[in-house]
Image: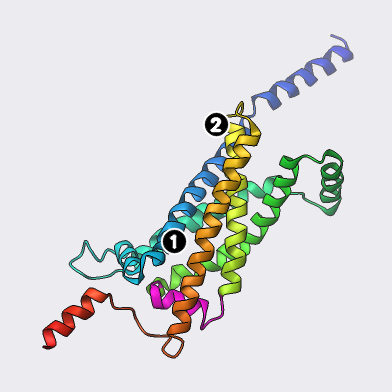
Amino acid sequence: MSNEEDVLINRAGLTDKVKKSRWPARLDLLQSLSGLLLFLFMCGHMFFVASILLGRDAMWTVTKFFEGYFFTGGKSYPWIVSIVVGCVAVLFVGHAMLAVRKFPASYKQYHAYRVHMKGMKHEDTTLWIWQVYTGFALFFLASAHLYQMFFWPQNIGPYGSGGRMWTDMLWPYYLIMLLAIELHGGIGIYRLAIKWCIPDAPRKTLKKIKWGLTAFFLIIGFLTLISYMKIGYDHRNNPNERYTPSWAVESVNEGGK
């Protein structure tokens, strides 16, 4: 057998090994699944915190539901929330580690991508870099939020959440995080639809749905943020006050008569 034949056989063997490697596809699938789960959690979380728009009692009820209040005879266990937050944090870190594989690894790569993006002038290419920007920002913003919710879940509530916005002056932080989450999540679900679900669907239609979802959740988020700021302002002189639902106050008043 000649040396040329050996080289050809080795090359063919290497090619087969590369083709048989399914790990890149598996990692892409894991990244997509974790991103989908986080997007669904984000939607649910937005509706939970937006319950304040239905009234303080509604938000208190949602909070106590997750603390097991209605299943344990009226006793709350905030550590249940910590367990949920811990699971979300693990999923969040796992998704970030999978996603960072595709980030530009150096300034040279980033510069090459920017040149390519300007030359292509393709909206999907621009959306991808914005997903990178917002994902990088969320690694710090969302991590801090998860840390806070994990160690102090008992502070979740109409007054506690309002106090964070106004007394602690964290509303700019939550505003930036809201924008980053909605942009990142909206772009991510659009890219998932293109890649896995409905690749033959018109991209213009999918983009309209994507921007519609983003606008919908941003409006809810802004209104929710304003509501918590108002509550925080109204109770700025007593930031440590715990909220008591109206029906409990009425029961106490009636019992005192």
In x, y percent, where is residue 195?
61, 33
Q: Residue at x 74, y 42 (%)?
A: 123
Q: Is residue 26 visible?
A: no
Within 10 Å of disc 2 (Cα), the crowding (few <14, some 14-19, many 20+) is few
Is 1 on the left-hand or right-hand side of 54? right
Q: Residue at x 63, y 30 (%)?
A: 202
| Quarter location, residue 67 | bottom left
Is residue 163 within the magenta segment?
yes
The span shown in magenta is 156-170
Residue under pointer 1: 85
For numbered disc 2, what is the local secondary structure? helix
Residue under pointer 2: 197
Foreground of the two, 75 or 100: 75
Q: Is residue 215 visible?
A: yes
Q: Which badge, 1 or 2, is on the more N-terminal residue?
A: 1
In x, y percent, where is residue 221?
52, 62
